Amino acid sequence: MIASEVLGCGITLVTERMDGARSASLGVWVGTGSRDELDAQSGTSHFLEHLLFKGTPEWSASAIAEAVDEVGGDMDAFTTKEYTAFSIRLLAEDLPLGVRVLGAIMTDPAFRPDEVDAERQVILDEVRMHADEPADLAGEQYMTALFPGHPLGRDVLGAPASVSSIGPGEIRSFFDLHYRTGNMVVAAAGDVDHERLAAEIDRCFELRRGGERPARSAPVLGSEALALTTRSTEQAHVVLGVRVPGRRAPERYALGLLNHVLGGGISSRLFQEVRERRGLAYAIWSERLLYEEVGSLCVSVGTAPEHASEVIGLVNAEIDRLGDSGVSSRELALAKSHLRADTLLSLEDSGARMGRIGSSMLLHGEVPEVDEIIGRVDSVSVEEVGSLGARIAAAKRTLSVVGPFEEGRFASEPSDSSACLSAGGAVERGAGSQER
């Protein structure tokens, strides 16, 4: 049973009681991510994610770790382009401890200068680690080319220059602006009592009243066709994709099904054609990334450099085939069955349930029932997926490649179509601005 309300302190609380559960998962979801930072602040949200676990004036980092460890609990956090989440999972009998710990770090972090400097080095090492990984670089390079000059195109981790220059005062100011109850959702699932938890959360977050969701603007510049980084690697790492409508678009369910047909599973067209039939890659997959007003559908693959052009051609051909002939009834039925099972299997524990209700409440302002979501997926027709496939095939494509290639290689690989997919369903011609 799901219950939700806005508490007196201004924070939104959503809970789901799970009969028979002996665990409880608690999370605080903050509606600010890397896209809400200025260029000079790039990486601040991720920096904060690290620093909040460093403790408060009353709790040291080691004291928090010992308290959670003693009861067998797990703490976690992650930063995305549009939100940051902090969570703890423990036995239901220890939930009051979880409330105290999360409440403390989310409302009264210490930001000790020596700990800020120490964590800065950890984050810089993380930035370098991702830069050394060619597959990660290809993905980040793709996003930068897909959303040039826009915060959605920046790396969540931030740039070395900005991470190096952010000081404790700037971090404190960012925290004071964004980490307020008007920009937060608290979610809990498992063996939880909504009323009791509401009283505890209201008390913990009383001093963080106010705040609001950050104002955002859609990308204005069109996407770029090609981004190439020359690097002496054993494989060519390729990402090819297009812009698609954002997470509130009515066709988002059709997009999920189309994604599965294209490259979302082992029966998908690309997995079967590129890996199983031709043996050109160990792994190839497609994924959809949905943001507030725009999104991405992209294919990622690693292949031998001598096969890169062939693989890119095969990916383009499958996207074109979606536009020409859509999907079959059998393909759509397989995709629906997979998404139904994947949805249900992902909700087997309290942590997954907490994640679902927390992110849904933060991003959509409501938590639809699972059966409602499955019903919406089941109602998608072959014609709807085919129409969406035609729009995607007509959209301008962005190609990102990392590998041992000379500058100018692949310049003619992406589709030469200049059409761009819009959230309203129309196809806009030309290389002008694209409001999503």
Image (cartoon, grey):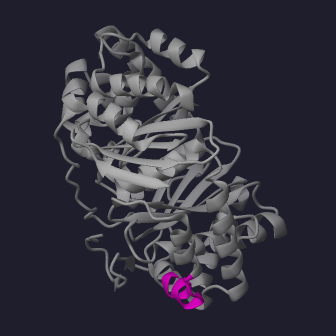
Dominant secondary structure (helix, strand or loop) of the stretch shown in magenta: helix
Q: Which residues are magenta?
A: 379-388
Q: Nearer the viewer, residue 71 or 278?
A: 71
Residue 164 seen anywhere in this rendered image of the structure: yes
Question: Which residue corresponds to the image point at 28% horizontal and 62% vertical from the top-left?
Answer: 219
Is residue 307 part of the magenta span, yes or no? no
Q: Nearer the viewer, residue 395 or 12?
A: 12
Is residue 382 part of the magenta span, yes or no? yes
Tell me where residue 186 appears, x and y as whole percent: 37, 41
Q: Nearer the viewer, residue 411 or 68?
A: 68
Tell me where residue 234 appears, x and y as whole percent: 71, 44
Residue 413 seen anywhere in this rendered image of the structure: no
Q: Nearer the viewer, residue 237 or 322?
A: 322
Say how many tags the image has: 0
Tell me where residue 140 appears, x and y as whole percent: 47, 48
Q: Residue furthest left?
A: 210
Question: Which residue corresponds to the image point at 77% horizontal and 61% vertical from the top-left?
Answer: 280
Question: Which residue corresponds to the image point at 78% horizontal and 63% vertical from the top-left?
Answer: 275
Q: Is residue 78 above or below residue 57?
A: below
Quadrant for the C terminus, please.
Answer: bottom left
Tell me where residue 306 appears, x and y as whole percent: 72, 58
Q: Is residue 332 above or below residue 347?
A: below
Residue 39 image-quadrant placement? top left
